[in-house]
Amino acid sequence: MKKDCVRFRELREREVINLCDCKRLGCVTDLILNTCTGCVEALVLPGPGRICGFLGYDSEYIIPFACIRKIGPDIILVEISEEACLKKC
């Protein structure tokens, strides 16, 4: 595999950090792919949990690929407005 390629299971192990406020958003749970081009359109992460995550999640972060600033060996740095990327499930 090429050096600059990453498997999905490796992405799931990396924590996503928002550069705007240095907040930890969580880990990648899913990807949105464009079936025509085969390109990744967005990363999907669980949103803030209801009562510390015990009752599940009712929202998720949809982070467009253009907002990814760096994919490192341990973390993924993004630059987003949380309100704009937080969607109800």
Image: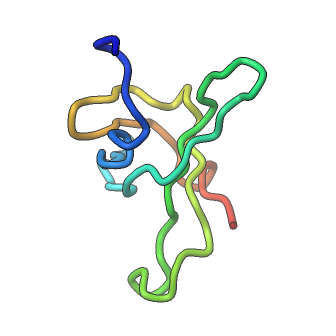
Location of residue 33 (image quadrant): top right
Q: What percent of the width, then of the height, locates residue 51?
A: 44, 88
| Tally of numbered tags | 0
In depth, the one of 15 and 51 nearer the eye is 15
Location of residue 9 (image quadrant): top left
Compared with 54, 29 (above or below) is above
Which residue occupies 33% across, 46% down?
17
Compared with 51, 85 (above or below) is above
In depth, the one of 71 and 19 nearer the eye is 71
Q: What percent of the width, then of the height, locates residue 65?
A: 55, 30
Compared with 22, 38 (above or below) is above
Q: Residue furthest front?
A: 1
In depth, the one of 37 and 76 nearer the eye is 37
Which residue occupies 45% across, 30% down?
68
Compared with 10, 4 (above or below) is above
Q: Residue furthest right?
A: 36
Which residue occupies 50% across, 88% down?
55
Colour convention: rainbow
Q: Is residue 1 left or right of residue 89?
A: left
Q: What percent of the width, then of the height, locates residue 89?
A: 69, 67
Q: Residue furthest left?
A: 74
Q: What percent of the width, then of the height, locates residue 15?
A: 31, 49
Give the quadrant of the N terminus.
top left
Q: Is residue 70 left or right of residue 54?
A: left
Which residue occupies 60% across, 57% down?
86
Q: Is residue 74 left or right of residue 54?
A: left
